[in-house]
Amino acid sequence: MSETIILIICFLLLVSYLFEITSSKTRVPSVVILLFLGWATKQFITFFNINIPELSPILPVLGTIGLILIVLEGALELEINKDKLELIIKSFLGALLTILVLVFLFAYLLSFFGDFSLKDRLINVIPFCLISSAIAIPSVKNLSPNKREFVIYESSFSDILGVLIFYFLAFNEIIYILSFGSFILKIIIMIIFSFIATFFLSFLLRKIDHHIKYIPIILLVILFYAISKIYYLPGLIFILILGLFLGNLEVLKEIKWFERFKLDELEHEVKKFKELTYEATFLIRSLFFLLFGFLIETSKVLDFETISIALVIIFLIFFFRALQLKLSKVPLIPLLFVAPRGLITILLFLYIQPSQRIPIVSESLITQVIVLSTLIMMFALMQKKS
């Protein structure tokens, strides 16, 4: 059986790579292909009655590592300078305002499905309100640099802000003034920790002369994120700061204070680190979406009890996204349709405690929203040339 599993995984990853390198011509996001391949594999295995061990516990592990690597990959590609300041502000405010509007609107709509507390309603709807950087970032690589940068910033901010709000609500039994103070303190602690950890990892990257050096650095990044998660700190802030630091060494060279870090020596190592990060991201992202596609049950996608609710959610997502882009003076097409729900949606849904779950927010509804939003993005990007 192990040989069969190895054959299937290797074949699927090679097919995934084939679609990855041809996506610029086909204009079909590789994530969509991965989901379909995973689903088709499930049908194949079921038809031939091949025994496969339970894989669902692996999904959140792959999802967490994938989220770290995807945000890191996106941050490594971003340039920070005065010219980008307006873009950063637009993407940050756009992500924040959209999340807040959708969260309270969806929470209000949930009140029609039962007498649930406001806190539980807010926790259950947050997963629907975040743009998945795991799907959005790799899907827009064929767009113009400005549009691509906007999506990277916006989806990264959406993930970070969404996780912050979710943790604040989920892990504070009673919310009062001191809770906000504690929340702000955690953000400050995380920012300070992020800079210290970034300098430490940069030092290791420059100093280690062993032939194995990049994998330990990536493992330390994942370890630091896991530790921050244990203490309910916003670890994605660390990932974003690390990526921005390593990806903007040319800019940092112009700042006299950074001369002591010997950025010229570090620059050579960062180039190799980026290459390994890109390959690791491809592997983990592919495995995650193949597994998610594999675990998708056709009955949940075609669940008519929730499909009408999913369509309402999709409509509201794109309606308020259109308003956001208009206010931000950002081109509507095709960015209007680049609002997929995906990895971060799944992870936050899995983090909801059983006592906080609302029945209508089911796996069927989550799956339908993810599939619909991803397909809409795919068809929009296939029609757009830049």
Image: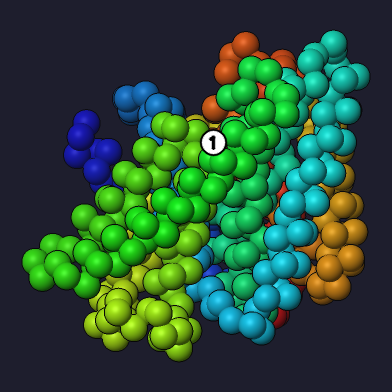
Quadrant of the image for the N terminus? top left
Residue that lies at the very extreme toward the left in this rendered image = 210
How many marks on residues? 1
x and y, in percent, of residue 219 in the image = 27, 50
Residue in the image at 29% along x and 60% along y: 200
x and y, in percent, of residue 194 in the image = 43, 55
Is 167 or 272 nearer to us in this picture? 167
In the picture, measured across the screen, residue 4 lies left or right of residue 156, that is left
In the picture, measured across the screen, residue 267 lies left or right of residue 43, that is left
Q: Is residue 213 above or below residue 109?
A: below
Whether residue 146 is visible here, answered yes or no, is yes
Colour scheme of the rendered structure: rainbow
In the picture, measured across the screen, residue 7 lies left or right of residue 226, that is left
Q: Where, by quadrant of the figure, is residue 309 drawn?
A: top right
The amino acid sitting under disc 1 is: Leu
x and y, in percent, of residue 101 in the image = 84, 44
Residue in the image at 54% along x and 40% along y: 186
Residue in the image at 90% along x and 59% along y: 323
Q: Where, by quadrant of the figure, is residue 184 drawn?
A: top right
Quadrant of the image for the C terminus? bottom right
Whether residue 34 is visible here, answered yes or no, is no
* Helix, strand or loop at mark 1: helix
Residue in the image at 79% along x and 37% along y: 103
Q: Which residue is mark 1?
A: 347
Is 49 or 188 nearer to us in this picture? 188
Q: Is residue 84 above or below residue 301?
A: below
Are there few (<14), some (14-19), or many (20+) residues within 10 Å of tag 1? some
x and y, in percent, of residue 54 in the image = 37, 24
Q: Where, by quadrant of the figure, is residue 376 drawn?
A: bottom right
